[in-house]
Amino acid sequence: MEGRSGKQTTASAPLLSTQKLLTKLIAALRSKGDGQYRLDRVVEIVSDAMNVDVCSIYLHVDFETLELCASKGLKSSAIHKTRLKRSEGLVGQVSVTASLVNTARAPQEANFSYRPETGEERYSSFLGVPILRPGQTLGVLVVQTKEPRTFDRLEVTTLEVVATVLAEMRETGTITGEGRALSAPHSQPVTYQGQIAHRGLAEGQILLHEPQVIISRVVSEDCDRELERLEKALKKLRGNVDQILDAEHVTVAMNSEQREVLEIYRMIANSSGWVNRVKSDILAGLSAEAAVEKEQSEARAKMEASPDAYLRDRLHDLDDLFHRLLRILTGQGRKVDDQLPDNPILLARNIGPAELLEYGRGLRGIILEEGSIGSHATIVARALAIPLMIQAKGIIAEALDGDAVCLDCNKGLIHLRPSESVATAFHNRVEVTANVTAKFSQSRDLPAITRDGVEISLYINAGLLDDLPNLRPSGAKGVGLFRTELRFLAANKFPTRTELARQYSRVLDSADGKRVVFRTIDIGSDKVVPYLKREDEPNPALGWRAVRICLDKPALLKMQMQALIRGAKGRPLTVMFPMIAGFGEFQQARQIALDQVERERVLSGMVPERVEIGAMLETPSLAFTSHKFYELADFISIGGNDLKQFFFAADRQNERVRNRYNSLYLSYLTLIKHITARCRAAGTPVSYCGEDAGQPQVAVCLAAMGVHAFSIRSASLGKVKYLLRQVCLKDIAEDIDQAQEAGVVSFEAGIERVLANVREYDEVVAAT
Ligand code: PEP
Ligand code: MG
């Protein structure tokens, strides 16, 4: 190994072996003095040891900006003055790609950016390596020489190992701005922005899903011992992986492709490629855990950069294995039966639905660094009514288990370790909101009748058995949308017909005679069932999903219908199909459903006393289909989430366009009016079950357009009812007509004007 022998391959190769360099570095890092002093020592030691003219450390001030924080060789006046955009220059290139740049003639490189204040024009060769933590680039470590040459393998390894040591330094990332060493990391208040996936406020303490493994020993002089530790840990890891993958519940009911994926996971655990890299880093002087973390950081960086989804998934597996290995090596990590802290707010990079369900309703809030609006975690968090923030970049590196946190999923802010004043103000808001919600829920037993005498029926959306306890206290008439696919998404194998029948039966038991509308399985698009073969599609939202899958693979729909019929145990059964785009599809799906009723009648004699079959109206085409459809459907439920995305051609999962248009656009309200008029003409009841109807100001407009039944989250019910009872739908309908006449685009301002006079409207808005 190059690092071990310290063999010098060129005249200008390192003067010191990597081992000795690391020993010097550690001594410098343990020395007294502030963080800036230690960084200054690092650049001096590295430039001497590697015999280079320049050694510099650039650190991220924020996600977009890098700052020159220490340098031996560049002008000292530039330190803490020179700042680069994330993608600017060769340094920026290293940061964005999280991979090294090694060139003999830097000024001739396309990305070279000249900064006169540093005096770097005199230097020709450039070697830059990223300073990485798993999932995060903290900065860039650079060496330069006047003499044009490329750096050899040993020099590259040396610099990468130094970067690993820097990544583990507590100071890294905190010594930016005017050269001041900021106070100790992980102790200051920090505010992060994220995207709101489920609204609400929560105060509590951070519960790390995968507590960060803290590496207290970065280097070791006894590489044989470290290699031995690694071997032992690898043996344990491989044993664990075999155990997990051979568990019966994982392998049963899997198709060959899924088994193949698991086998790849096992192969990665056993592969020698990454293990060899870890070993050579140990030989270069890193401790086993630091070497593993170095590999993990690099794998993560590749994962993020890879455009290939398949490769990304494999790298994700590798990342997961590294994390397990680190836990074995350091003995850190959470045990399954560990006690949860009070008011836990879960923090994870990403999380699967099954894992989230394991935490259950005990969580006050959830923060994800990744995640998306349509992810399973989002669906489950919504079903559990837990505030959820996604895309909260950078928080994992900063947060520690048990840190105080105020999660503001109404404004998209996370206050980590809030100052006293922020915490107090936030607490007051939480109290006000709780009081307002309690006040609105007092009207739960009053009818939702508008001032002009229209009675509106309110139902709740549900998808898990856990949701049903909300039904009675909410005062709702029943469940207007039961998302049956959640059971499929949360499982790790295909549920059997008997299991499903049992679940449906328990749902109806809990509903205690109230109406439950079961929406047949709505998978595909964003709702990916892990154990079903998945097609790669260019536009999954417009692809093979929902009823389209069921019509192409009728066995699935038949099985689910049989489970529903059996679960009903003679009670009335109401089902509807998602994503119907035309009359023909509805006829086919309905026929399959009715055939199953006949089949069950013959087999057991036990069928529901009444079967109602409806359709979700989620595609604009259905709004204009034959009147025969409207006559045949027993009821219609407008799936506003999808209808809106198809109507505006704006992906509901794409944050860029999702909020560009809204349900108060006059064009959309006109579409709703058209649909309700057609339903009225056919004598077919119509309801609305998109999320937007949970916003009281939207609900009143939809009601004015003729929607007289809503299915919404139970938490929104009180507010919607409170407002509905105070408005005159006829007046609002007239205002909407006038706005449409006048060429107004959106009725947002219009409805605000109407509601300005409504009692306590401000409170309704505050609680929304
Ligand atoms: C909808 O599209 O409005 C709907 C209720 O279904 P989902 O959000 O589950 O797609
Ligand atoms: Mg939908």
Image (cartoon, rainbow, N blue to C red):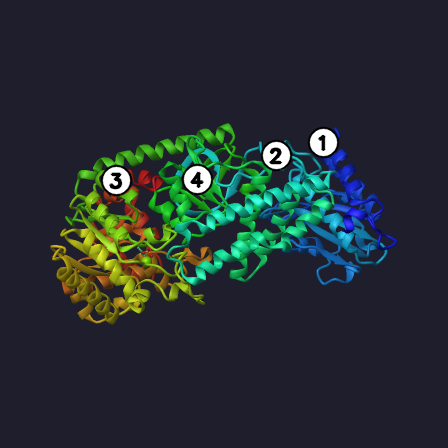
For label 1, count other residues whose C-alpha is less than 10 Å away and answer few (under 14), some (14-19) or many (20+). Answer: some
Q: How many marks?
A: 4
Q: Amino acid at mark 3?
A: Pro
Q: Residue at x 44, y 43 (%)?
A: 411
Q: CA distance from mark 4 to mark 3?
A: 26 Å
Q: Amino acid at mark 1?
A: Asp
Q: Amino acid at mark 2?
A: Pro
Position of residue 272 measured from the top left corner of the image (x, y, whole percent) = 63, 54
* Residue that badge 3 annotates: 469
* Residue that badge 2 annotates: 185
Q: Are marks 2 and 3 in contact (CB under 8 Å)?
A: no
Position of residue 721 measured from the top left corner of the image (x, y, whole percent) = 23, 43
For label 4, count other residues whose C-alpha is less than 10 Å away and answer few (under 14), some (14-19) or many (20+). Answer: many
Query: Could you tell which of marks 2 and 3 lies nearer the N-terminus?
Result: 2
Viewer can see residue 682: yes
Query: Could you tell which of marks 1 and 3 lies nearer the N-terminus?
Result: 1
